[in-house]
Image (spheres, grey):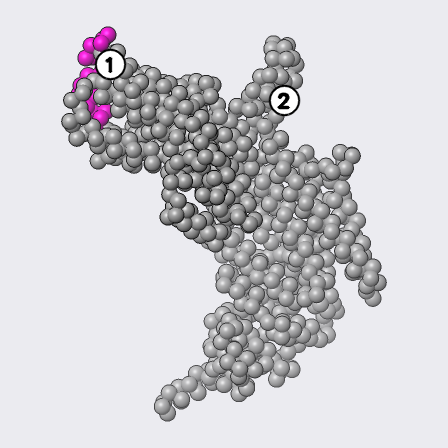
Amino acid sequence: MFFVKRRARKAAARAATEVHSLLDAASAQAQPVEQALWIIELLDWLRRGPDAALLREGLSLPPTLAAQDGEDTAAPAEIRRLQTLLDVLDHLPERRAEIAAVINGPLRNTDATLLLADFGFSQRPSFFSEFSERLGNKWLPKSPETRDLAVMFALFFPQAHDAVWLEALDADTLARLRELLATREIETEKTASAQLWRIALLDALTYTVSQIRASGFSPDLRSRMHNSGPLAGEVEAPFKHLAAQYETVQTLLAQQPPGDEEALRQSLTLLRAGLEACRQQADSVTAHLEDYGTSVSLVYVLHQLHQRIDRAEALLNCLVGDTPARDTAHLFANFVRLNAQRRSLRALCRHNTALLAEKMAERHAETGEHYITRDRREYRAMLGAAMGGGLIMGFTTWIKIGILGLKTALFWTGLLAGLNYAVSFVIVQLLHWTIATKQPAMTAPAMADKLGELSKPGGVERFVDEVANLTRSQSAGVFGNVLLVMPVALLLGLGGLAVFGPQFLPVPKAEHELQSLSLLGPTPLFAAFTGVLLFLSSVMAGWAENAFVLHRIDSAIAWNPRIRRRLGALRAARWAAWWRRNIGVMSGNVSLGLLLGLTPEFFRIFGLDLQVRHVTLSSGLFGAACASLGPAVVNDPAFWWALAGIAVNGVLNVGVSFYLAYRLALRARGIQVKERRAIYTSIARRLWRRPWTFILPPRHAAASAHG
């Protein structure tokens, strides 16, 4: 016990010596870069220094009140060390002004505007430019010899954990820090640090307000903002008024002595209202995306605009808020998190994926609604439309077999097969029929709309209702396609055999096709991969539809003089309206057909036998093989394994494309982990209590929601 106490006393003495050495190293006469290095060392000591209780013992300081009450352990270790350091400085008045001068040094010697106004905002909207910049932030060393406080801040707070203890600073510690920084500094300094901080905040606000106004005046946003007044120019009225509102506040704050408090309060109220009006105008852009289209750059500008409005409000709170010290700590904590993101390549990929997802989901939702059935009438209509699609796909199957029999080069085989699929899909669409598994990927925007309502009462249940409706729709689509494509392909095969003989589809070829569909082979892998292609086709359809609207192709068809001379005014208007309604589904049909045809041949170039396994096409191939093999095929185990493989095909085609569409919707709406758990719990509860609602249609649409 004696040796334990002796070791503890030595450790306490070393801790006390360490803190005194740290404080003695601070010099207000040192070069700015040396002062920055001392601050870095100080902050590193706060993170990794000795235990606060041991340190207080070595310095002969009494325990804090929180420690006496047993609450001290709840505070982060950094805060406890900071409190101890402040206690030490209270007993060292000769060092207090020196330390204050060093800590205030970066504010005097650097430009704080870029930190306060622009920190965390990307200057390069290009993904690859931002990627290279983050690579530099992550791997290239930074120098504290700079006049950019943003660079220095990244050196001061390199760890994301710093945000935790900055936000946990209590009011008493913040007040003591503020008192320390306001200590009367050395005589050579003419401007007080508090005044420098105030000037920096005002400059940052000026910069931020200018950026907000510039964004509001950009042509892409102006054309999409909601106009509630009689004049077209009123769309940017909040951004116009923002300059005058801020100038009034700036003038009152810059007055020495300060101006009329009541006038300042009213001016601040007007400025905050102006910022809120700008936010509402930015929000109104989303409602006009259906008319004007969207782009990743537009979504990026919208995000930046919202974030700059948030930054302006945060700077106002630091400047004239009720708790400026607390608000400053929160602002710095936010900067720490932004600094961690600036070095994260994963965060960049997540952010850009979210931008793409939001771009995809903002439009194209109406089309997705047409692929969801909600009652028995719609279910029967979907079943009938799917049977019509199965009829066409029976012919498509035999055309595909004929293309393979041509033995052309890989590219031409893939292109012809892709065109065969694409033409068939377009015919099915023009006849108002449907193909199974195209549906789930098309419904991502519809799901995104429902996910946007999760916070409302009953929002989760309504989303689960939508999932159940979608699952029933998929079952109707798959059942309808399979019920007709098999017999049609079988009858066509029997007819071909009767006319052309056994060479129409030789038995070895038929046996090979049947084996290729077996569940025991790579069929599940191929089916899951096909689900990815189904989803990609919907992404391409969304891009095509959005580009059509963004570039106003429908208006060009309707009003371009050359097109109107060729088609006539009435026909041009009809064509424009038709393409506006159908560009998305037509693009999806063509892209899906080409993906299904060209992808296997592309991988064969590299020696990879990666096939597509679409449930409808596989069912047609199954019927064609059975026509060649005859009735005795039912005695072959390969027959039953192929049937099982087709069933798994349907599940994986639907499941994978649905999952990717669901992930797209989650990204687009920014759904958090807590809300996702609520969704999963609600779906599991519905499966346990009413599993039939995912397969059988209700009598009426309302029955789905109420069980």
Magenta-span inclusion, residue 514: yes
Q: Position of residue 467 (x, y in %)?
A: 44, 40
Q: Residue tagged by mark 1?
A: 494
Q: Nearer the viewer, residue 601 or 468?
A: 468
> What is the three-letter code of the residue carrying label 1?
Leu
* Picture disc at residue 555: 2
Please state the extent of the stretch shown in magenta in the rendering.
498-515
Q: Residues within 10 Å of mark 1 (few under 14, many from 20)?
A: many
Q: Nearer the viewer, mark 1 or mark 2?
A: 1
User: Which residue is painted at 64% across and 82% down in the image?
Assistant: 94
> Which callout, 1 or 2, points at the residue further toward the start of the chain?
1
* Picture disc at residue 414: none
Q: Position of residue 604 (x, y in %)?
A: 29, 28
> What is the three-letter code of the residue carrying label 2?
Ser
Which residue ends up furthest to the bottom in the rendered image? 2
Q: Position of residue 494 (x, y in %)?
A: 24, 14
Q: Is residue 62 left or right of residue 241?
A: left
Q: Residues within 10 Å of mark 2 (few under 14, many from 20)?
A: some
Q: Establish if 675 lies above or below 574.
A: below
Q: Secondary structure at mark 1?
A: helix
User: Which residue is painted at 48% across and 43% down in the image?
Assistant: 706
Q: Position of residue 664 (x, y in %)?
A: 47, 41
Q: Nearer the viewer, residue 623 or 115?
A: 623
Q: Secondary structure at mark 2?
A: helix
